[in-house]
Structure formats: structure tokens, C-alpha cells
Amino acid sequence: MAIEFKPSPSLPPPVNSVGAVAWVRQNLLSSPLNIFLTLFSFYILYLLVPPVIEWGLVGATFTGASKADCTGDGACWAFIGVYFEQFMYGLYPSEETWRINLALILLVLLLGTYAVKTVNKLYLSLVILVVYPVIAYFLFAGGVFGLEVVETSLWGGLFLTTLLGVVGIVASFPLGVLLALGRQSKMPIAKSVCIVFIETIRAVPLITILFMASVMIPLFLPEGMNFNKLLRVLIGITLFSAAYMAEVIRGGLQAIPKGQYEAADAMGLTYWQSMILVILPQALKLVIPGIVNTFIGLFKDTTLVYIVGMFDLLGRIQAATHDANWLGMTIEGYAFAGFIYWAACFGMSRYSMRIERKLETGHKRN
Amino acid sequence: MTNTNMARAQLALGEEAIIEFNDVNKWYGDFHVLKNINFSIKKGERIVVCGPSGSGKSTMTRCINRLEEHQKGTILVDGVEMNDNLKNIEAIRKDVGMVFQHFNLFPHLTILENLTLAPIWVRKMPKKQAEEMAMHYLERVKIANQALKYPGQLSGGQQQRVAIARGLCMQPRIMLFDEPTSALDPEMIKEVLDVMVQLAEEGMTMVCVTHEMGFAKTVADRVVFMDAGEIVEANGPHEFFDNPQHDRTQNFLSQILNH
Ligand SMILES: Nc1ncnc2c1ncn2[C@@H]1O[C@H](COP(=O)(O)OP(=O)(O)OP(=O)(O)O)[C@@H](O)[C@H]1O
Ligand SMILES: [Mg+2]
């Protein structure tokens, strides 16, 4: 199809309602209450912003090798600099960290390929979801092609956080979809299994699940069948967020008008065809905010792995603040952690808004 | 039902029936919504179903492609009995197009994608061929220039014409219409009815629930009147409108024709 539909642009608004002055008048000074709130907000900003800038930028020390180099009265960012590698990679051997970087670059390149029009998106997705994880696993763990073996107990820092978050998100999403469909299904056994699973998982705190995964499961498994702790924790996190995901998606499924199901049925589509082609695309689009909410929650919840002795970004930072040579660096450490988490979560949120806009197909009539 | 009507509802022996209701009964809980429906429709026949609100018109029509299940009796479509057998149901649904009151287009797909979905996935037609066919039907409903818009960007009448084209894209042997014009503004009703009249003239088997009596008069082979879950009367349009047999039919007709 060569023709493409292009909506004609809307006309610009009348002249007197644009411009900075008009905006300020309309949004900040429209009523006495509004004027008061505006002034009050500026006062709060005045109280907060200058000291933060003073501490974090003006009076801060950015470079240095030890605490003694921090002579200013502001933040001591040298602390972050010294520990940076640990914060990023945990105890992963320095001379091997290029493997993590390589895997990251590979992922970015693959994701970037989506922008190329001629590439088959289905094959690309298969490569990213099936081939890439295998490559990444062997890069991280080693043991092939002469790569040195790196035990998973050494994995840590932002690397571990990202790994837990990404694997948790990618694995819990399809599982959540299946659970949501199962809960809505007419087959009594599938339905009960899904309900019991969802309700049980949701009734238990994540800490309990992580604890079970790392400590209890090995007790029940037969001798010698012990599998990797990181894997167990990953499964725990995935199951946990899948249960929440399922409920979010179920909300979307319920919001789809009955007529859509009927139209799909009447065409002779099978159950899976009508779900995949008709219902899920609409339902998932409706609940993007809820899905992203769950993703963000999961990403931050991964910090709980410190409970089972794994040192993710936050765990590494906390450990570093206990270093006798760097005592008193708690605020710098947490500020850094906060910034990284904020950037990641804010990124997810903006990205989801972009997807939502892209999927907008005109106002809903039926 | 009187004997003469019974004779008309049941086809004369030897005529080829494409849809057959035999003693069909349906309940919603305690509510008896279809009562002893006996009715045959032969190939190429155009049936208009009318009756007061809640009389079971939609329910009966939707039993034909098993959007509703009946509890007693048998329904044969193209010789295949509609029961729990999923294979049968899917096979019949390929051959039965349906147009709904509220269009039920898929809002996340373009008009063209709405039309090619079933041909590609159910009929396993190559995409290019499906698109050509879709454009052909869009031209027939005079809306080909909108092919790449989304349903939300069309008017109600345009959407309903797309829905008809979507039904036709399955190249069905039977088309079901459930009040296709009752959600539309008067000026849009005509554009949809025109398409339906054209379709009727081409010999499509049609079952159409509608209150458009003008449409019934011009295209129907038989008009079926339902009340309280029963087929009260089924007759050719002339006799149905000029000489209704049953009190309830007379009542209904006087109500909808005199305003
Ligand atoms: N899912 C359902 N559960 C219970 N009762 C129902 C259900 N669907 C329909 N009914 C009832 O069955 C009866 C027949 O409904 P139906 O939709 O077939 O009527 P209709 O003749 O098409 O009416 P209308 O002209 O208003 O569309 C109505 O009284 C309705 O209340
Ligand atoms: Mg109805």
C-alpha cells in the first residue's frame, strides 16, 4: 500500500492565548488563591533549592582518592568515584567487566535495529528474546570460548539490579498475560489454578518469597539437585510480579466491550487468534499505566535481594558506606542510588507515555 | 401459530434449506426466551425479523452462529448441527457473516486490517490477495478512500458499511444483520440500507433484524414477526403488511407504522 493516511494538522489557537505572559496569567495568577499558591511554592523552592545546589555542586569535591581529599563543606563525590566500579559491577573481576559492557552494547544495538524499516520485527524480537539471552548468559558466566568462569555470587551492583529487573520484567509479562487469561477462562481447572496462584502470591510479601527461594527450597530439594541461588531468586521475583501483572491485565480484559469478543468469534477466529489479534492488543494498551507501574515496582523491589545475601546497587552502596576509611558518606551514597533509580524509573515512565501516544487511533466510539 | 403460517414457516418438501430451526428452546435462567422455534430458511432467501423489544429477535439470530447456545431442539446450518463441537462452530462461522448494531469494528486496526483479519487468519489467504479483495468490497460499500483510517475516525454510517464489507470479506453464504441501522442518524440509515439492498439483489441469503419496514417491503422474501420468544407469524411482505393474520401482528404493525 503506497497511500498513507495523514491527519491534517489542527489550526493554531487564537493569538491572544499564547505566549509566556498569557501562560503565566492563566496558569499561575488566575485567582487570589492561585496567586497565593504560586508565591508559596516559590518560597518553598527558595528554601530548598539553593542549599541543595550549594551542597551537591558548589561546595562539593568531585575527584580524589581518599576521604582526606574532600576538603570542601559540600558533598564528597570522590567516594562515588572510588567505588564506582563496584557500584556498577559488584565483585565481578575488573579485567572481565568488558563482557558486561559488550552484552549491554549488543542489546542497545539490537534494540536500535527496531528503527530500521526493512528488518522483520518478528525475527528481531525472536533474536532478542531467545538468542540474545543465551549469548548474554555465556558472556556473563563464562566457561565457553576460553572465557573465564565468573561465579554468580560475584555478580552485583547496577549490573545485578538491571539483570534482576530486566529478566523479571520480560519473564513476568507473558506469565501475567497467561494468568489473566486463565483466570477469565471457562475451563474450571485452569481457572482455579490461576486464581489460587494469584491470590496466594499476592497474599505473601516479596521478602518471604525471596527467603523461601534462597533458603527453604534447597531444604526440600533432594541432595545434589541444588540449583543456582540467583536463578531461584529470579524465579521468585518473576512469579511475584506475574501475579500483580495478571490482575492489572485482567482489568484491561474486562474493560473490552463484549461486542469485540463477539465480533472476533463471529468471524470464526479461534480462541487464541481472537485473544492475540483482537482482545489483548486493546486490553494491554488500556492498562499500559498499570503495567508500567508494576514494572517500576518490580525494579525497585529487586533491592530486597540483600535479604538473601546478594549485593545489588543499593547493597553495594550500603556496604561501601560501612568502609572504615569512608565513614559518613551515607548521604552521598543514597543520593547516588536515588538518582540512578529515579533515572531508570523516570525513563520507563516516559517511554510508556510515548508508546501510549503512538498507539492512539482516534477517539473511541464503541 | 396457525396452521397456514406453520406451513409457510416450514418449507415445502424438496426445497433446499440452508438454516433450519427444529423445536428450538432457550432459557436465560428461568426466563424462557425462545419458545419452540420451528423455522427454515432456504438458500438465497431474504428474511426480515421484526417484533417488540425483548421478544428474542437478537437471541434467535445469534443462535445461528452460536453466539448464543440453545438448550433444546436442533439448529442446522448448511446441514451442520450447531452443538458443543467447536470444529463445527468454527466451520460454520467461516460461512456466516454478522453485522452488529454497534458495528463492533476493531478500533486498534485500520479499516483495511479489519477487513483482512479473518481472510488471512481464518481462510489462510495470502496477505496481498486479502488486501485486494478487501479493497474490492470497500469499493462496493463506497468507502475505499478510507481504507487506511482507523474506525474511530469514521462516521457511524461509514463504520457500519465497513462492518458489512468486513462480513463480506469472508465470502459468506449467509449474512446476519442485527438491527444494523438502529444506532445511526436518519441520514446515515439510507447509505447503509442501500448497501444491504444491493446485497439482497445479488442473491445473498440474509437474515435481518430491523424495524425498517420500507426495507422489509422491498427486499424481504418473508417477514417474521416475533413476540415473547415465539414466531407469531411469517409471511411474504405483501400478505404480512396488507393482511396480517394475528392480532399481535396487527397491533405491532399499527404501532410502528402510525407515527
Ligand atoms: N445474557 C442475558 N441474560 C439474561 N437475559 C437476557 C440476556 N440477553 C437477553 N436477555 C433477555 O432475553 C430477552 C430477549 O432478548 P433479545 O436481545 O433477543 O431481544 P430483542 O428482540 O433483540 O430486543 P431488542 O429489539 O430490544 O434488541 C430480553 O427480555 C432480554 O432481557
Ligand atoms: Mg436485539
Image (cartoon, coloured by chain):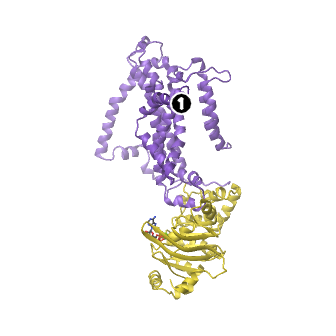
Chain colours: A purple, B yellow
Direction from residue B137 to residue B70 in the image, left or right:
left
User: Residue A301, located in which quarter of the rendered image?
Assistant: top left
**Numbered label tally:** 1
Q: Is residue A253 visible?
A: yes
Q: Amino acid at mark 1?
A: Leu
Q: Secondary structure at mark 1?
A: helix
Residue sitting nearer the eye, A118 or A2: A118
Residue A337 position (above or below residue B209) = above
Q: Residue furthest bottom?
A: B243
Q: Position of residue B180 (x, y in %)?
A: 53, 69
Residue B87 position (above or below residue B204) = above
Q: Residue furthest top?
A: A68
User: Residue B87, located in which quarter of the rendered image?
Assistant: bottom right
Residue A216 position (above or below residue A291) = above
Residue topped by disc 1: A231
Placement of the N terminus of chain A among the 4 image quadrants: bottom right
Q: Position of residue B115 (x, y in %)?
A: 62, 60
Decide if ligand 1 comes within 8 Å of the CB at mark 1.
Answer: no
Q: Position of residue B214 (x, y in %)?
A: 54, 80
Q: Is residue A285 visible?
A: no
Q: Position of residue A294 (x, y in %)?
A: 46, 40
Residue sitting nearer the eye, A202 or A2: A202
Q: Residues within 10 Å of mark 1 (few under 14, many from 20)?
A: some
Direction from residue A209 to residue B89 in the image, left or right:
right
Q: Residue furthest front?
A: A222
Query: What residue appears at the point 51 percent right and 34 percent down from the top-left corner?
Result: A235
Query: What residue appears at the point 65 percent right and 63 percent down from the top-left corner?
Result: B170
Q: Chain of mark 1?
A: A
Direction from residue A34 to residue A196 in the image, left or right:
right
